[in-house]
């Protein structure tokens, strides 16, 4: 009888460990790999596309109703669910401390983003999420730290719609 209990307990332990590792692996699935390619990025709140204005502008907006040249980006998987966003002007979307800018050259940590396909958020290396401000210029903020009173604990997606983005396949991007 004692041997039966030991084997039963060890089997139960194995099942618990398998369940633990399965759940752990599922938590990483939200950073699903996006296939390298051309995409448009649309804000969930108002269905406006992310756009790099071009013409030498360093700012970018979420105010375009259609995805034309400046609203198409080449997204590349780089490591551990991180992506880079490459614009029509040959620069990468970069989350600097002073704000978001387009930066030329090889992508560093500042140009790498986690896209969470469940929450539909882009998170920078310093844990801030991309969102359009009231004037449609894209900014980053840590929603949970800056708006703790608005945080809805236990919500399926605790981010407001303006923090959420949809990645849509597109064609005709400039590639890095």
Image (cartoon, grey):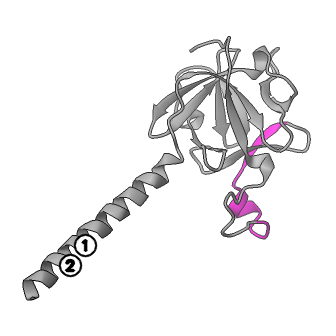
Query: In the image, 166: left or right of 25?
Result: right
Residue for point 24% across, 67% down = 14
Mark 2, residues whose alpha carbon is within 10 Å: few (<14), some, or many (≥20)?
Answer: few
Query: In the image, 131: left or right of 169?
Result: right
> In this rendering, does residue 157 appear at all?
yes
Q: Which residue, given by chain and number where applicable, does mark 1 sit on?
A: 13
Query: SS for tag 1?
Result: helix
Q: Is residue 148 magenta?
A: yes
Residue furthest to the bottom? 1
106 in relation to 162, above or below: above
In percent of width and height, residue 15 lies at 29, 67
To which quarter of the image does residue 140 belong? top right
Q: Which residue, given by chain and number where applicable, does mark 2 sit on?
A: 9
Query: Across the whole image, how many numbered discs are drawn on residues?
Result: 2
**Quarter of the C terminus within the rendering:** top right
In percent of width and height, residue 5 lies at 16, 84
Which residue is nearer to you in this view: 161 or 132? Answer: 161
Query: In the image, 19: left or right of 5?
Result: right
Which residue is nearer to you in this view: 11 or 119? Answer: 11
Which residue is nearer to you in this view: 63 or 9? Answer: 9
14 in relation to 6, above or below: above
Q: Are marks 1 and 2 in contact (CB under 8 Å)?
A: yes
Residue for point 91% across, 39% down = 135
161 in relation to 98, above or below: below
Mark 1, residues whose alpha carbon is within 10 Å: few (<14), some, or many (≥20)?
Answer: few
Query: SS for tag 2?
Result: helix
In percent of width and height, residue 114 lies at 57, 42
Residue range of the region highlighted in magenta in the rendering: 137-150
Kindly report the distance in space between the C-alpha atoms of the residues bearing marks 1 and 2. 6 Å
Residue for point 69% across, 55% down = 142
In percent of width and height, residue 89 lies at 70, 15
């Amino acid at each position: 009888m004692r041997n039966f209990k030991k084997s039963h307990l060890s089997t139960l332990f194995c099942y618990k460990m398998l369940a633990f590792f399965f759940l752990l692996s599922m938590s990483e699935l939200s950073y699903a790999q996006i296939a390298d390619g051309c995409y448009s990025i649309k804000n969930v709140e108002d269905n406006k596309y992310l756009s790099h204005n071009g013409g030498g502008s360093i700012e970018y907006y979420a105010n375009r109703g259609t995805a034309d040249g400046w609203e198409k980006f080449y997204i590349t998987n780089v490591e551990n669910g991180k992506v880079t966003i490459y614009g029509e002007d040959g620069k990468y979307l970069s989350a600097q401390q002073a704000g978001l800018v387009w930066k030329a050259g090889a992508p560093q940590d500042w140009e790498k983003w986690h896209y969470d396909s469940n929450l539909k958020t882009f998170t920078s290396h310093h844990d801030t999420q991309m969102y359009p401000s009231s004037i449609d210029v894209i900014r980053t903020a840590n929603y949970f730290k800056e708006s703790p009173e608005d945080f809805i604990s236990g919500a399926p997606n605790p981010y407001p719609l303006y923090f959420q983005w949809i990645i849509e396949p597109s064609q005709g991007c400039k590639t890095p």
